[in-house]
Image: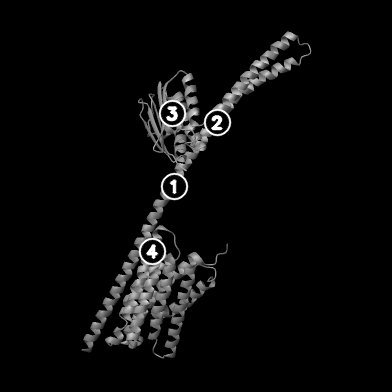
């Protein structure tokens, strides 16, 4: 009887210890499960953050490259159109100070100086205009875009079909500048890379969404090759689209032209 | 060997309570509530040890203070961490049930309150599980302590549940002692985690 009691007791204790060990095991398993899930989630978050960081770096680099190119272009323009001409002016002005100068020569040099300074004036106006067209600031986006199209038509390289309908004041002025730059970049690409002959630009506001629709019949490019895109200044357009909270769609293939649709929401205040 | 562990947990609990108490004033609410919990536990353990040395025999009444105090303080602790109002409602509800139990059956005072202990420990285990789930996504305070609460309360529930065997089935004193020893080992694990939490996040750092 007593022996049975002790064996029962032992059995009970064994079961109790096993049960506690099992509970402990389960508890550890659950803790480990949470621990590894946490690690995995943190790893995923880290990867995502890294990806975002590298994208931003790429963007920054593209922006810096564009900025440097722009500076180089301005420097070149200043040098070609202004500095070299002012050198000539300085030379001729120096000749004017000569004591043995005849009236005829003085007239000749004076005329020369006048002519050159006029060209320099014109050039500096043009450079300033290229940097920031006064039309945009004074009259708004629509006249500025029309002026841009006119200038492009003057090159006689393209036949341009355009329809622009943006009421003045529809877009805030800083957004107007972004939109203007986007169109300017598209036209620059058309001039530099596309070999296109026909361009089409539609700009209209429908249900508070401003749509900018650009097409050309040029040689196009491979949308999936990011290097090519960066070279074409597409990153700048993408950046500006992001700043405008807009959506950008680029459809292009080698030898089949480019179609770009930019939609931005108009905020009614 | 086990005897040493049992003794060690008693003094270690006092030590940990002091460690946490050092920076009591300039820490979060959760930290303060947890420190009070540690102090309560160490007082109960020391009293229990004192009574054991005096050989007065009855230490079981301390168990009631232990599990009810633990339930109240850890409920508040998890209420601060999780910010769910219903934790307080459950706290009131469970305390009501316990009050009903003790007023209805005064002899309960001399036994282990198995049902009460299991209910309170399981509720706390659920809170710790919820907190563990929440801390997957965000870095939170007391992650290690939370693991300790989860593991210790879950596995010790069964020990307390079988506490009355000594009374009901006439199991010898050695069984009760063995259960105590097992509990001490599990408790040591919990204490180590509490200590690690302090070491990792709250120790005095020389800048």
Disc number lying in front (2 or 1): 2
Direction from residue A228 to residue A2 in the image, left or right: left
Q: Give the numbered dot on residue A138.
A: 2
Q: Which residue in the rendered view is the most extreme toward the right?
A: A99
* Nearer to us in this view, B52 or A269: A269
Q: Give the numbered dot on residue A50.
A: 1
Alpha-carbon distance for marks 4 and 2? 61 Å
Q: Give the numbered dot on residue B132.
A: 4
Which of the image's four quarters has the N terminus of chain A?
bottom left
Asked if the residues shown at circle 3 and circle 2 are in contact, with their CB atoms under 8 angstroms apart, the answer is no
Q: Give the numbered dot on residue B67.
A: none
Residue B150 location in percent, x, y? 37, 69
Q: Which residue is mark 3?
A: A164
Disc number lying in front (1 or 4): 4
Asked if the residues shown at circle 4 and circle 2 are in contact, with their CB atoms under 8 angstroms apart, the answer is no
Q: Chain of mark 4?
A: B
* Callout 4: SS: helix
* Callout 3: SS: strand
Q: Residue at x 28, y 77 (%)?
A: A16
């Amino acid at each position: 009887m007593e022996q049975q009691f002790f064996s029962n007791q032992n059995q009970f204790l064994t079961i109790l210890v096993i049960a506690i060990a099992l509970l402990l095991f389960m508890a550890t398993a659950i803790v480990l499960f949470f621990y590894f899930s946490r690690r995995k989630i943190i790893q995923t978050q880290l990867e995502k953050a890294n990806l975002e960081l590298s994208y931003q770096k790429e963007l920054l680099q593209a922006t810096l490259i564009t900025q440097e190119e722009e500076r180089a272009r301005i420097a070149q323009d200043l040098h070609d159109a202004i500095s070299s001409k002012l050198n000539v002016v300085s030379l001729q002005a120096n000749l004017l100070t000569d004591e043995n100068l005849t009236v005829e020569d003085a007239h000749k040099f004076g005329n020369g100086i006048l002519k050159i300074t006029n060209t320099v004036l014109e050039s500096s106006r043009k450079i300033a205009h290229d940097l920031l067209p006064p039309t945009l600031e004074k009259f708004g986006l629509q006249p500025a875009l029309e002026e841009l199209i006119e200038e492009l038509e003057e090159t006689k390289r393209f036949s341009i079909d355009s329809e622009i309908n943006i009421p003045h004041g529809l877009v805030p002025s800083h957004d107007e500048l972004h939109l203007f730059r986007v169109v300017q970049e598209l036209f620059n690409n058309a001039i530099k890379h596309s070999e296109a002959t026909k361009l089409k630009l539609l700009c209209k506001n429908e249900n508070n969404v401003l749509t900018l629709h650009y097409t050309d019949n040029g040689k196009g490019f491979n949308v999936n090759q990011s290097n090519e895109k960066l070279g074409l200044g597409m990153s700048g357009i993408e950046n500006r689209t992001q700043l405008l909270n807009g959506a950008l769609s680029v459809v292009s293939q080698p030898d089949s032209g480019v179609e770009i649709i930019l939609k931005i929401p108009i905020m009614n205040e | 060997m086990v005897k040493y562990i049992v003794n060690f947990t008693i003094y270690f609990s006092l030590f940990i309570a002091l460690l946490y108490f050092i920076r009591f004033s300039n820490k979060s609410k959760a930290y303060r509530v947890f420190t009070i919990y540690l102090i309560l536990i160490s007082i109960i353990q020391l009293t229990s040890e004192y009574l054991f040395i005096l050989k007065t025999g009855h230490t079981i009444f301390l168990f009631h203070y232990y599990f009810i105090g633990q339930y109240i303080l850890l409920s508040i602790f998890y209420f601060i961490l999780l910010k769910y109002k219903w934790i307080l409602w459950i706290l009131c509800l469970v305390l009501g049930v316990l009050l009903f139990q003790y007023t209805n059956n005064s002899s309960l005072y001399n036994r282990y309150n198995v049902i009460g202990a299991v209910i309170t420990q399981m509720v706390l285990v659920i809170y710790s599980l919820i907190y563990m789930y929440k801390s997957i996504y965000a870095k939170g305070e007391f992650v290690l302590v939370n693991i300790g609460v989860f593991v210790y309360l879950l596995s010790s529930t069964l020990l307390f549940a079988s506490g009355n065997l000594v009374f009901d089935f006439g199991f010898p004193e050695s069984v009760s002692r063995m259960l105590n020893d097992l509990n001490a080992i599990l408790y040591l694990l919990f204490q180590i985690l509490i200590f690690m939490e302090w070491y990792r996040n709250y120790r005095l750092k020389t800048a």
